[in-house]
Amino acid sequence: MFIFSCDNGHKGMLYYPEYEEEVYSVPDNGVIKMQFFNENEGWIVVNGRVYRTEDGCLTWEMVTPDTGVHVSRAYFVDMGHGWCYERYGKIYYYNGEGWELSIDTGDTISDGGGIKFYDGEEGWCMINYHRLWHYYGGRWDTVIGFPSGYGPFSGLEPVGRGEVFISNFMTFAPPVVIHYKNGVFQIDTIPCDTIGFGYSRFLPYIGFSSPDNGWGIGIRGNYPYLGHIYRYRNGKWELYMLMDMSIPFFLEMLSPDNGWIALEVWEDEFEEFYYEEIIMHWDGREWNIYYIPTDGKVRFYSCFVTEEYLYLGANDGHIIRINIENWR
């Protein structure tokens, strides 16, 4: 049904886990961007609005900056501090009581690349895919010398003070990852299959447990979709695993032996497509693959993971929470 293999011998074992899921409603339909700190507290961005919960997704309070602001992405250091940006380039800061304008970058976007903080003092933001903003010392500044000509970028992964990795969103050439450290840009070309000349390639998600240990997931962007997993070690990227008919939408490394990937896989049966979900867990030795049946009725577009729970954001205005402690 699904192919998980690579020429270098890496394979994954497919499991059908037993689990109980909890289903919670959210105030709006759309792609749900999530961030949770514990069983009770977390934030979501959905349909341009920001909501917070303090009772485990039972109720939601809207805390969008201002009327008419359409929030694209947000990142919170904790429940009392966070940043978001909206489609016309304004970045807002949440101080625990309300939002205040942090900077008007002037960049206009449809969705943007991403925003992520290393800690409460330093963070990074890409609003229009081509310009990198750096937050430190209470202010935002443009990072001078950002490489051009490599296509739009999306994935942001801070790994240390003054150090961040940035990945391609889409390109017709082999994708690249930009490594920025203390004023110096390094461009790493990602090894990619050559099947399908002219096919677009995506590397939208990267995750690191340390500056020297990371992963990336991407796809060849034309049907039949071919998922790719890459590993970063000793300053180099290598192709680790290929996955047939797979579209990744999440990657997070909680520690060197605790990483998570979420994929949407397609089944083509009698010329009808069915969407199912695959969750992959890295235990420090291999990727274990867990099949999450949806019967093709619900599509998940977002995911978040903590030490205890896996959250899946469905396209019908729901969040599904699964206890994953017994999976490892």
Image (cartoon, helix red, strand yellow):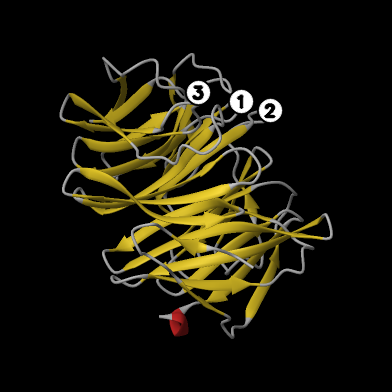
Q: Secondary structure at mark 2?
A: loop
Q: Quadrant of residue 136?
A: top left
The C terminus, quarter of image:
bottom left
User: Which label is found at residue 283?
Assistant: none
| Cα–Cα span, label 1 and label 2 | 15 Å
Callout 3: SS: strand
Task: Report the amino acid beneath label 1.
Answer: Ser
In the foreground, 76 or 254: 254
Mark 2 surroundings within 10 Å by alpha-carbon count, few (fewer than 14), some (14 through 19), many (20 or more): few
Percent x, y for residue 235? 18, 43
**Residue 259: % across, % down:** 37, 64
Q: Which residue is mark 3?
A: 90
N-terminal of the two: label 3 or label 1?
Answer: 3
Sequence order check: which comes first, mark 1 or mark 2? 2
Q: Quadrant of residue 60?
A: bottom right
Q: Which residue is mark 1?
A: 110
